[in-house]
Amino acid sequence: MSNVTISVRFRPLNSSERRGYDDAICFQALDAKSFWFTDEKEDDVLFCFDKVFYPDCGQADVYEFLAMPIIGDAMNGINGTIITYGQTGAGKTYSMEGPNIFDCDEHDKGLLQRVVDGLLESLKSSTDMAKCTLKLSMVEIYMDKIRDLFDLSKDNLQIKQGKNQEMYISGATEISISNALEAMRSLSRGIANRAVGETQMNLASSRSHCLYIFLVQRESVTDGRMRTGKIVLVDLAGSEKVEKTGAGGRILDEAKKINKSLSSLGNVINALTTGKTSHIPYRDSKLTRILRDALGGNSRTALLCCCSPSPSNASESLSTLRFGTRAKLIKTPLIAIASEQKDNIEKTTPNNSHDRVLENLRMHLSEEDVDLLEELFMMKGISFDPQSPEDIESAYDDVTFQIISSVQQAVEDLRDMAEQLTRENSALKAENNALKAERASHQMDLNHFNVEEMPSFFGIITIGIVMGIIVFSCPLFLLLVLRR
Ligand SMILES: Nc1ncnc2c1ncn2[C@@H]1O[C@H](COP(=O)(O)OP(=O)(O)OP(=O)(O)O)[C@@H](O)[C@H]1O
Ligand SMILES: [Mg+2]
């Protein structure tokens, strides 16, 4: 059984789709799991998924199918991830937040509001737990940088690998939540900080991938065990055809980054499902690196493929559906999740660590049996040996990744600088040409002066000299005549 559940959601037609295509739709429902899809360019295609939400399905249906099992697991220390995927304007953010995170009626509440309610309810009803805490972090991956939406000064957070090989975002702000109102206030503050822009396809298009991270910790009254479960809700930015969204300038730069990271996600899913390669390219983007646990088996994952029902968007919907079909082939044995649960318990309960168990066993068993058990613990990944080759390999991987990232960053900076210098150079050239033109026109004026004004200038001087000679020579001539 796969740990990845794939559902499809068709939103209702919007007004421009109704205008252009006369209420036509591109699918024909068969049942709650399958439908025929019509694309003008191809024959009808039959699709089957774990669940299909047609346009008349409500937000509560989506929550019950996708999120309720994940909340139950999180209470038992098993991590869960819900990802919304699809074309821009297909209803990903609506499925997560509803029309408005803070101000919407019960019927329209999105996954976020319902997950908060569900988690708080489950924590309240767990009577055998001494201490329960719920924490929330919100980050976005914008232009391939991770920004903390609760603290915008943290604009380049790093992804790290924990002792149990799990991925986490180092330094992200965590806010404790004790009631729904508090949670909604925090969520709405974070959402207000998210990068959103207007395109021809969506007035409030998400320009970043947003991650809502809920951390549930429960300490048992009976054995003092601490269980930690993480639920990550991922609202992806939509894939875009630039000619349809009318993107230019900043919006175009954002679209390029969005499309690039989504194609990395597609490559990871292809690598996970073809079985042809042992290398899964998680490191190709921040998005795939952070989703490694969700796709690689350390989490129960639900993917919601959001589609427009309109024939005008049929080719984009078809590619979303093909993405979902491919993801359905990901097979991760549940044993990976079970060992994650053990790891979680071990990691958070130092008193109950394997050392204490082994010590107790030593009192009852022979030294040899205890050594064998310890080896078994190691094999199952229950204990953590900092000197193990895996640990060294992971540290090496991290350093390599950091070096590659910083070199890539440096290359990008250099490219920016080269572009800037080229722009400045062109501006200087233009200025230089303008100066040259000005100087040439001055030169022409001067030439004009030389050619046309010079004779009259010399004429005046010649007349002056002649007059001077006459004035000076007249008295001299008179003097000479008088002497004689
Ligand atoms: N199931 C639905 N019922 C009613 N309205 C919906 C539904 N899904 C989406 N919408 C409306 O469609 C519009 C686009 O939806 P949304 O913003 O969720 O798209 P998106 O997939 O997040 O797009 P982007 O990738 O650009 O962020 C919004 O106005 C939203 O209210
Ligand atoms: Mg969105």
Image (cartoon, helix red, strand yellow):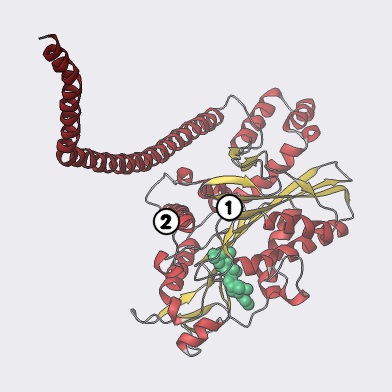
* Residue 343 picture location, percent across and down: 68, 41
* Residue 246 picture location, percent across and down: 44, 67
> Given the current orientation, which residue lies at the most extreme left position?
484
Quarter occupied by the N terminus: bottom right
Separation of marks 2 and 1 at Cα, in angstroms = 15 Å
Q: Which amino acid does label 2 sit on?
A: Asn
Quadrant of the picture in which ligand 2 is shown: bottom right
> Given the current orientation, which residue lies at the most extreme bottom position?
22
Residue corresponding to mark 2: 270
Answer above or below: position of 316 versus 144.
Answer: below
Q: Can residue 108 be seen in the rendering of this structure?
A: yes
Residue 149 or residue 348, whichever sits in front: 149
Answer with the quarter of the image where residue 300 lies: bottom right
Q: Which residue shows up at 17% across the image and 38% down it?
A: 456
* Residue 394 picture location, percent across and down: 53, 33
Residue corresponding to mark 1: 294
